[in-house]
Image (cartoon, rainbow, N blue to C red):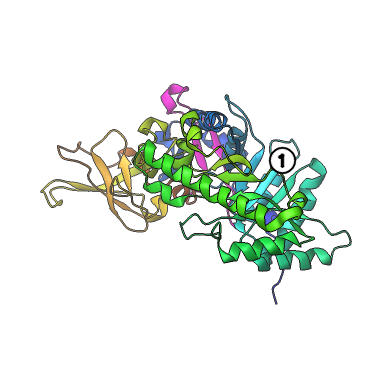
Amino acid sequence: MVVQTKTPIDLLALPDKERLVAEYGGKGLNEVRTPAFVIDRKVFADNCAKMHTRAKDWDASFRAHLKTHKTAEGSKLQMVSSADKTSAVVVSTLMEAWSVVRAGLFKDSTIQDLLYGLPIGVNKVQDVSDLWDEVAPSGGVIRLLVDHPDQVKFLEEFESKREKPRKWSAFVKIDGGQKRAGVGPKSSMIEELLKTLAKSPAVSIYGFYAHAGNAYASTSQSEASKFLTGEVNSVNDAAEFAVSILGEDVKNHQQPFVLSVGSTPTAHSASAETRAKVSTLLHGKLELHAGNYPMLDLQQQSTSMIGGGNIAQKVIATVVSIYPGRAEDGGDEAIVDAGAIAFSKDTGPSGGYGDVVGKNWRVGRMSQEHGILTKKADGPAEKLSLGDTLEIVGQHACLIAAAYPWYYIVDSDVEQGKKIVDVWVPWKGW
């Protein structure tokens, strides 16, 4: 028996933002306890505007993923930029969804359309139903992902017990070959799923959703563009197949279908030029989605789609010891108070776990609570002293951010980004 549970948002004890701002606002980065996570608000906002521009150039709507920063302040910057605005989001956890509601982002219409970004689990139905009840008075909508016929069936069972049954709006999650979530665009599984949806009183098809996670291996604009085209082809093939399966019943679903594609590398390749490469015979309207793009990291830099100046996040760490001559080449090594929990253990093409900004050092090895600094490249490494505070950019912003109870916010237009201008408290839990 599956027990329906609700995310305990009211039980979550978050740090007090007002107290943190009062304590740290106006201080320099050299005054914070390390390890500390820092976001440059101007760079973050500029990245949001650039993504809105890409979506417009690609003649697509835009759905922002909130999973990287998980904050109300960051969400607002993703929704409304200097270039454009959107009111559609995707979240990875129900804690994120409830936190969006609690932050008042539906009530003030900043967000109106929220997609829960995992295939819906039977133990989450009560929660998303309560979410729908909560946002409906503000005109908000909750959308789901489905990729198995039984998900439709347990949604039907749930709605049949309501006094006034509703009809859910769902994306069909498509696997474009990545073997993450989703069904193949012309597989026997999607055929069964579509036939189940055709007859369903509880679920209608909003569109088809794909995420090219393998696009993170891109190393050029042309490679990322190929991944993007592949995403479009997979959801378009699925939509075409749906039309053939649904027949006259297609009118009972969203028309035209929404074809939602994107990952940060592929979204960065969206442009008028890449749009021209996409088939003009689309069986729906395009939607672009991405999540890492406001913050970015070494992994994204390795795709060659961004430069170091576009990265909005970094970790501040303190040198706590130095080991002269310990390196294999006879050079020095050092240790900082930031390890696997502060950086994650993700590596990437650049090597190591993080690069020290402006210095020939990287986090080359690590344990749980400390990292070992090794020389990054040929040539001398700068002299370090105990107590030095270093700015380090890590491999994967999403996992790094998840480690911190709050973020120190700077602005590169304010005292060269060395002064804390705000503190953001991220949503924690599932």
Whether residue 68 sits left or right of residue 314 in the image: it is: right
Element marked by disc 1 = loop
- What amino acid does circle 1 point to? Gln
How would you rate the neighbour count of disc 1 (Cα within 10 Å): few for under 14, some for 14-19, many for 20 or more?
many
Residue 63: name its quadrant.
top right
Residue 98: x, y in percent?
A: 68, 51
Of 313 and 296, the residue lying toward us: 296
Whether residue 249 sits left or right of residue 16 in the image: it is: right
Kindly report the secondary structure that dominates the magenta region of the rendered protein. Answer: loop
Residue 416: x, y in percent?
A: 41, 24
**Residue occupying the point 47% across, 49% down:** 212
The verdict on residue 428 being magenta is yes
Residue span colored magenta: 404-430
Mark 1 — residue?
A: 112
**Residue occupying the point 79% across, 41% down:** 138
Outermost bottom residue: 1
**Residue occupying the point 53% across, 51% down:** 234
The verdict on residue 420 being magenta is yes
Outermost left residue: 330
